[in-house]
Amino acid sequence: MTHVLGANQYGKSETRVVRVYRDTARHAIRDLNVSTSLRGDFEAAHTRGDQAKVLPTDSQKNTAFAYAKLHGVSSPEDYALALGRRLLDAAPAASAAQIRVEEYAWDRIPVTGPEGPVGHDHSFVRRGTETRTGVVTVEGRGDGQRAWVVSGLQDLVVLKSTGSEFHGFLKDEYTTLPETHDRVMATSLTARWRHYGSAPTADADRATSWDTSYEDVKRILLATFAGHHSLALQQTLHAMGSAVLDAHPEIAEIRFSAPNKHHFVVDLSPFGIENDGEVFVAADRPYGLIEATITREDASDPGPAWVGLPGFC
Amino acid sequence: MTHVLGANQYGKSETRVVRVYRDTARHAIRDLNVSTSLRGDFEAAHTRGDQAKVLPTDSQKNTAFAYAKLHGVSSPEDYALALGRRLLDAAPAASAAQIRVEEYAWDRIPVTGPEGPVGHDHSFVRRGTETRTGVVTVEGRGDGQRAWVVSGLQDLVVLKSTGSEFHGFLKDEYTTLPETHDRVMATSLTARWRHYGSAPTADADRATSWDTSYEDVKRILLATFAGHHSLALQQTLHAMGSAVLDAHPEIAEIRFSAPNKHHFVVDLSPFGIENDGEVFVAADRPYGLIEATITREDASDPGPAWVGLPGFC
Amino acid sequence: MTHVLGANQYGKSETRVVRVYRDTARHAIRDLNVSTSLRGDFEAAHTRGDQAKVLPTDSQKNTAFAYAKLHGVSSPEDYALALGRRLLDAAPAASAAQIRVEEYAWDRIPVTGPEGPVGHDHSFVRRGTETRTGVVTVEGRGDGQRAWVVSGLQDLVVLKSTGSEFHGFLKDEYTTLPETHDRVMATSLTARWRHYGSAPTADADRATSWDTSYEDVKRILLATFAGHHSLALQQTLHAMGSAVLDAHPEIAEIRFSAPNKHHFVVDLSPFGIENDGEVFVAADRPYGLIEATITREDASDPGPAWVGLPGFC
Amino acid sequence: MTHVLGANQYGKSETRVVRVYRDTARHAIRDLNVSTSLRGDFEAAHTRGDQAKVLPTDSQKNTAFAYAKLHGVSSPEDYALALGRRLLDAAPAASAAQIRVEEYAWDRIPVTGPEGPVGHDHSFVRRGTETRTGVVTVEGRGDGQRAWVVSGLQDLVVLKSTGSEFHGFLKDEYTTLPETHDRVMATSLTARWRHYGSAPTADADRATSWDTSYEDVKRILLATFAGHHSLALQQTLHAMGSAVLDAHPEIAEIRFSAPNKHHFVVDLSPFGIENDGEVFVAADRPYGLIEATITREDASDPGPAWVGLPGFC
């Protein structure tokens, strides 16, 4: 019974790269958490401890910082593409590089200028709870090199205080849940969407940037969540994903992982108090967890785009 | 060597109370994490396990939910005052009750109505990283009852990419830090401010609400952070606190706990790359920690207002 | 451009089931965090909000509690197999069920009995930092039903203060890391190993239990980590996995995810102090991350055993 | 309404100092998280940004590392005393220094030697969930210098599956909790105890070390928890503290903060299943929180020993 090395990868996780643009007095900032990994012919390191083909994770970290200056960070996706290509060049034994980026958003601190409210030139406050994500996988070399881009967000916490029902479900002998025609629905959304190619649009007439694409997808997700009358969290996610695919032909598929953050109506009747959907307890655990993919029928081959990404079936 | 019971308190921590106002189609939401504690003559429970004077923490939790309906949540402070007074009434052995509230803010999801962008009636998205806090301590009964209110916020993450210096410091044989005239300054701010009384203003002419008071203090903190040219984080905090006291005569003192979230310039010179304050590593640990109080010379007696609140010297 | 539902699953996550065995005065305890998920024909819930085939996650939770009594918890794996089979029976539209269990270990509190030190009958203290894990996937019905069992552990924090080298690696223009022949090596290990079948041994002569199998694998992992002179974390993991496969013919493959928790030698030379590998700073981020699989050449088909498990490439 | 600087302090938090003793082939390790803070005449830094009296937090960090070698780490308390005294010397404007240390425990990995099971010479595994703590405050200079030592532990998770009752409590109109004569009692204990002086024993005949003192106090806490039939968590804590004071005359007082980690009996009766205290749900929030002090009647003045320590009333 011989045993062999199976799938493997290595890299540097969670390099905290902060890039300040200070060419003018009005600074801009991109705040990233960067993880890199390489796959390929690294068997000698595993079986003999031979590092001759291994580009140290420390060098990968150095490259992440150097490229924040050399290439710049116009968007997480663009930066990750450049970084992934560089690491493949630097490590000849690697067949693929995956770059995972989380971006933390900042708003300019509002101040009052001579002509009214403006954002401060160089003072910022962290925005929102959600984190923007980008995962780039680059494979191969030269003309055969391909790249996959998965954009996304995580920890987008949303809630609707009505417009959500849950009934008509399957019942077995362990079912005690009452049916409801009006409940609170809340989730901390993770969504990831795969682009057809390695540019933010598939359509030359719709020239756009990764940043504007991201903002528009987020806007659609929020607006659909708000406007959709829900019979199931699954259905709401399906509507959200469908709306994104309808509006963005450059996106091949979208995946969701959505914990159902239960808000239970508190029984106040022992105290003679009526509670008509006004007082809830927000529960921690357990929570329902819904994972779903909405994809075009003719979506391109995902290849390695989703390998190793947690939270999806 | 006899030993005796010293300071003690008990209560229910982190009751997650969500209050929805749905009197009209345009809902409102207050999302709270409520902790209650009682102090007083509870020695029998400690020495003999005798519970006759002990109002169970479970009852305290029930009351927190019931009061979200009976009294309502017009603000964390107002709700906490009502809850604290109720618990003192319900537990005759208690001499004081402390109510600690964290509030999570929600924004209406932006949607487009017939006349342009509006907020959705009943769909919300979590706002910002910071949490609003309120701590109320009620002591005594009847005419002698007194209350202290400490409002605040935590985890307000701010950064300025210039306008901060650090030099002229004391040097010993373990000092290697270079002086700097331009650095990134960032912190995750906790601030708490004590009101003179148990109403949001000491001045009948400045009638205000706890909510508007909170928003204005937060605005002043941010604007002062943004506008202040800093020679030390201590100095920036002092300016922030002074500005709050100048604008809000109803506030007796303000306390800060501010980790100095170091952003170190990455040395790219080994790679022949100049880094003129453009690429930083955001460090996790260790971090400087500054704690400071700014108080009026004639501030009222804080009494038990600060007892048990972490993060302040 | 039609879009369709892709891969999806749903279930209840993190149900905290604590099972006490109290048939005698000497109690036993199994402390579990249970997550269940179902895959299959649930499209109507997604597209139309039709719940007729959906067994509520609340019912899944109830079943998790009921089965802790009905079936009992002789081991995480055995309990998960029973629960998975039950959920498949209860939800006819499901084609597969995956049960993920984390188990927290407890030791009896040591006390002194009439004949010396013993463990207390019903008082316990939490053991160690690591969590035992078990993931069971059950697919199909009747005679065609199959089950896969992946046992494991996570957060096993280990360190060796010598016996680890790192040199001879690939160098590019961003490489500044010095080579070392003696470093601290530390990791917080996640390991998961897949059994051939749905019993803890493939070999009738080696009758064993899931619990004894787990303890022996953990022992081998620790002993190999301790005894292996390391030229690379990859090599150490490979040796650990090989040792497990050598000793346990019932295991088909083992996968690791191992952050390289860097301990950097602190430069004390500016202070005239020699530091010959005695004072280290334990860094938080970034960290190297090594993921690897060691598998038998003739390992059985993993089927859906690894679907959705994070942390592995 | 002039405002002035109130209480303030500054320092470096969470320096992760790892000290390896490698004088022989059998290494030893002390793994610390060190926070330092200084109080005193630092007003100029706050009001004018003048740093002339400010020893940078970066220098405090350097000193923490240097002293791990120069003074060594025979115990957290001994190391903290040396570090506190040094920082007071280095910063003439400081009137007091407080050093807070958390220590993570490691066990030798068990291996089999020629004469049976032994611990490995240089390979370790993290022990337990609890963290040992030590807080030292040094005040003054020369002959008048005083020091206070507070030892402790946090996150010691204990549970008893019987031997705990809760009844006879005060009832109001919001009380729904049933009385019980047999419940699960569990907590994640934080305890801190103050020594009379700056040596681990007040009694020359009982010469001991900080390490043996710590181990014995922990042993007493566990054994008393295990052996005590509880009518209230308060009572159990009181018994635990009293037992420590009885056995350790060098300890002046002990303080506890103990969340009541509720384990609720799951109602299985809807499914026709009897649950006689066998299946529980471990709840996250809310939780009862008990804080208590047990002190000698003639305990010495605590001075600044407890200033700024969270979790105690």
Image (cartoon, coloured by chain):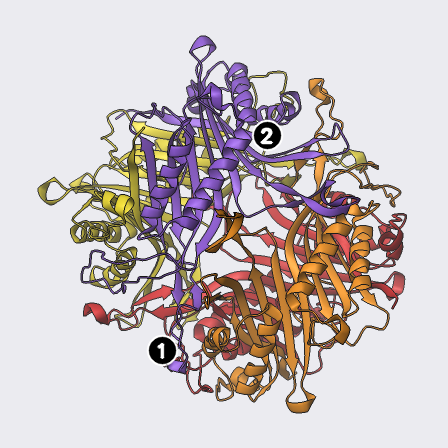
Chain colours: A purple, B orange, C yellow, D red
Query: Percent from the top left, x then y, of residue A108?
Result: 68, 42
Q: Nearer the viewer, mark 1 or mark 2?
A: 1
Q: What amino acid is labelled 1 in the image?
A: Asp
Q: Is residue D110 visible?
A: no
10 Å crowding of disc 2: few (<14), some (14-19), many (20+): some
Q: Residue furthest left?
A: C143
Chain ID at mark 1: D
Q: What amino acid is labelled 2 in the image?
A: Asp
Query: Percent from the top left, x then y, of residue D127?
Result: 50, 52
Chain ID at mark 2: C
Mark 1 residue element = loop
Q: Is residue B211 above or below residue A42?
A: below
**Quick one: B183 or C132, which is closer to the camera?**
B183
Q: Residue furthest front?
A: B115
Q: Is residue B90 above or below residue A119?
A: below
**Quarter holding residue A59:** top right
Query: Percent from the top left, x then y, of residue B215?
Result: 67, 59
Residues tagged by mark 1 and mark 2 found on one chain of the structure: no
What's the distance in space between the residues labelled 1 and 2, CA to CA?
A: 55 Å
Q: On the rendered structure, is A254 left or right of C278?
A: left
Residue at (53%, 60%) from the top-left corner? D155
Q: Which residue is mark 1?
A: D182
Residue at (72%, 34%) from the top-left corner? A27
Mark 2 residue element = loop
Query: Percent from the top left, x then y, of residue B50?
Result: 48, 87
Identify the mark at residue C182; answer none if there is no mark. Answer: 2
Q: On the rendered structure, is B17 left or right of A64?
A: left
Q: Is residue A67 visible?
A: yes
**Quick one: B120 or D178, which is closer to the camera?**
B120
